Image: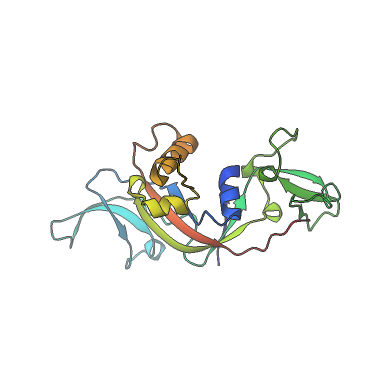
Amino acid sequence: MKQTPILFNDEMVRAILDGRKTQTRRALKVQPPTDGHQLLNVMDSTDRRQIGKSHWAVLNAKKTLVIDGHKRFFSCPYGKLGDRLWVREAHAFVPQTAYRCSTGIYQQLNPNDNYEACVYRENFDRSRSFSWRPSIHMPRWASRITLEVTDVRVEQLQDVSDSDAKSEGITVGKNTPQAVDQFCRLWRDINGEESWSANPWVWVIEFKRVDSAGYY
């Protein structure tokens, strides 16, 4: 079983903790060279390192022969069915005794240091002054959320359905835009203004929580 770190912002961490987010979309690093290329999975090859990986290719009219195969082979960097993802989020290190009696503040203890614990920006009022560490710097011991991959597929970004947008953590109310429109805004906020219109191919990773986080 492979374990891979994955980054989420505060809003998406809360959506996971609330049980609203069970999917995430991440752009493929290797995009097709042209619109005519299709994604192929390697089932048989003289090079065993290619088996189980994917690549972009142009097929003949009957789709029985590869006319042009892209040289770069790749697989999902977030693993496959049954693998685990450990969530990295904005955090800070504090003494273990700092928030032990604080209601609603989760504190992860460092198993290798009797003094140190980790707290999370998502738990705190944003006005609180803290030296928050970026999510990318979170060590494995400090992660409070572990996810199990339940499905992996590839599709173009704008193919997201209304139900899938909701599974991305989007909530819809009487006075809010439709789920896909909200997801579009979220994607642009995270990835840049032109990232939605580019309509990249994305990994769609579905997951479920398998950790048992609690509050001190």
Question: Coloring scheme of the render?
Answer: rainbow
**Relative side of 155 to 147, left or right:** left
**Relative side of 139 to 36, left or right:** right
Quadrant where the C terminus sits is bottom right
Q: How many numbered discs?
A: 0
Q: Residue furthest front?
A: 174
Q: Measured from the top left, where is residue 136 in percent x and y?
A: 61, 43
Q: Quadrant of residue 52?
A: bottom left
Q: Residue furthest left?
A: 61
Q: Is residue 75 above or below residue 188?
A: below
Residue shown at 31%/46% (left/top)? 32
Residue shown at 75%/35% (left/top)? 130
Quadrant where the N terminus sits is bottom right
**Relative side of 147 to 131, left or right:** left
Residue shown at 74%/56% (left/top)? 215
Q: Quadrant of residue 55?
A: bottom left
Q: Measured from the top left, where is residue 140 in percent x and y?
A: 67, 54
Q: Give 126 or 24, whichever is nearer the viewer.
A: 126
Residue shown at 41%/62% (left/top)? 49
Q: Give 77 or 189, whichever is nearer the viewer.
A: 189
Q: Measured from the top left, where is residue 5 in percent x and y?
A: 58, 53
Q: Measured from the top left, where is residue 167 in percent x and y?
A: 46, 54
Q: Decide if residue 9 is in sight here.
A: no
